[in-house]
Image: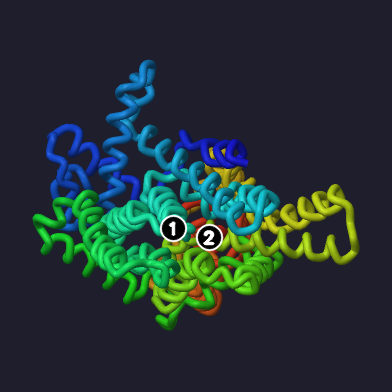
Amino acid sequence: MVVLGFGLRAAFYHGGYGHPDETITVEVVRHMRQSGDLDTNWAKAPTLGTDLRYDQYNFSSHLYATYWFYRFVKLVPGTLGWRSEDEGFWVYRFFSVLLATLVVGQAMRLAERNGGRTAALGAGLLTAGAVQLVQDAHYSRPEAFVTALTMALVAIGWPREKLSLPAVAGAALTVGLLVACKVSMALLAWLPLVPVFAAWRGLSGRVRGWALVIVPVGGLVGFAAGAPGAVANPAAFVNGIEFLMNQYAGLHPPHSHLNGGRVADMVGAYYVATLGWPLLACGAVGVGVLAGRRRWAELALVLGPVVLFAGYFATRTVFFERNLSHVLPLFLVLAAVGAAATVEAIGRRVRAPGWARAVAASAVFAVCAAPGLRLTAPLLAEEFSGAGSDRHMAFEAALKQRYPGEEWKEVSLLNDGPLIELAARLQADRRPVLLRITDFNDEWNAYNLSLFAARFDAKLVADYPGNFSRVPGCTLHTYHSPHDWYYWVTGLR
């Protein structure tokens, strides 16, 4: 399963697709390498775009990890050509590939602890094929880094027969590193205390005191290690936090509701589409299994982060699925435990032989993994490979040949500005326009498309639905494969 996970994550990572935030890693790490100044303040990266080049320390620990990974690669013989290509960009991306692959193994280990080897294999399949995790692995962004650290945090904090203070310290350090990357990771600050309170009754007063001191001190040390510049320049760190808070408190079309409402329904719709009801049901069963076994500490470690982050980001007005990437493998672990326990319980009831239970478990896991794999396949084969882009360009070229010499315009109707411009153009010049409207399966385009239909004489001449037409608005559309509508616009109504 780990090999499968690596294959899906490494496939086409060297492709020509892009992510608007990859420039952050490229430019900040470039500045660190060229100047010798290891301060991760974005404002110090001279070639970073002006929209991003201001005082902030977001992603700091990820930027350090990427920098040190590049330095490690320099020690590996035969990597000169690879690491020199595009100034190390492909090394940065491959770092995400490796971290995202590690997550598959981490999920299998956690599932084995909760539900045995069958659950481990199921968790491996579900995690390997999850489209959200495969997508994250293909960008030089912090999601794979944060996900691997979150899984490590849960594993380190797993209850033991005897409390390990070094493990508590390791968990606290991990929390600090996470917060140094994304301040929202402070929602995990309580996890190092789970093994402490699980063993509380059997601890001496001295050990209790040490544990309660280690957690905050370890967190501060981890944060200082991941963002030393933020410690020296707290105003810049706070500036970055304020920017993010404002971003997620306002509207961000197409990743917000038109009315500015909370995005809980968008979160739910996305996961129904990408995970499917069978997997979601198995996740609920997994929660019941751990609760029925009275494994409260383990349930807190696995379910607690899922509930906290899903609940918090559901109350925001902006939905980016990446904000939940790091807790998705934990839910997949619960789903694998639930599926394995269900098959085992039914197998015992009907006295099915071992081989029949194995076949049944394989079938259940295949059904649960199918929705994610059906999306992962075109994401890799079409979008990351570049084949989809080539096919799209050929489609448009053929369409333009049907209207030789006619004016061509491309818009996205995230507001009515393009409609106002189009109306002005048709009033000044009555010649028709061949218009492409890029739709992200969002409310903004849907509303303005209705205005377009009411205001203009237009005929739909072509439709290119993209590869993710059944998925509600998300970054699969905005970064890779939107729905394009093509209209022959002849005038105003």
Q: Which residue is depicted at the point 43% across and 51% down?
A: 152
Numbered badge on residue 330 = 2
Q: Can see residue 132? A: yes
Query: Residue 11, relative to residue 45: is it above or below?
Result: above
Secondary structure beneath label 2? helix
Left or right: 465 as drawn, with respect to 199? right
Foreground tag (2 vs 1) = 1
Give how far apart the Cα atoms at labels 2 and 1 are.
24 Å
How far across and how far down the image is residue 4, in percent? 62, 39
Q: Amino acid at mark 2?
A: Leu
Q: Who is closer to the viewer here, 142 or 410?
A: 142
Please, what is the three-letter code of the amino acid marked with disc 1?
A: Lys
How packed mark 1 is, by other alpha carbons closer than 10 Å (few <14, some 14-19, many 20 or more), is few
Please provide percent x and percent y for residue 329.
Answer: 53, 57
Secondary structure of residue under mark 1: loop
Q: Which of pointers 2 and 1 lies earlier in the amino acid sequence?
A: 1
Q: Find disc 1 in the rendering and name its residue.
A: 162
Res. 184 in view: no
Is residue 441 rendered to the left or right of residue 462?
left
Q: Horizontally, is 340 left or right of 176 in the view?
A: right
Question: Pointer 2 and pointer 1: residues touching (CB < 8 Å)?
Answer: no
Outermost top residue: 78
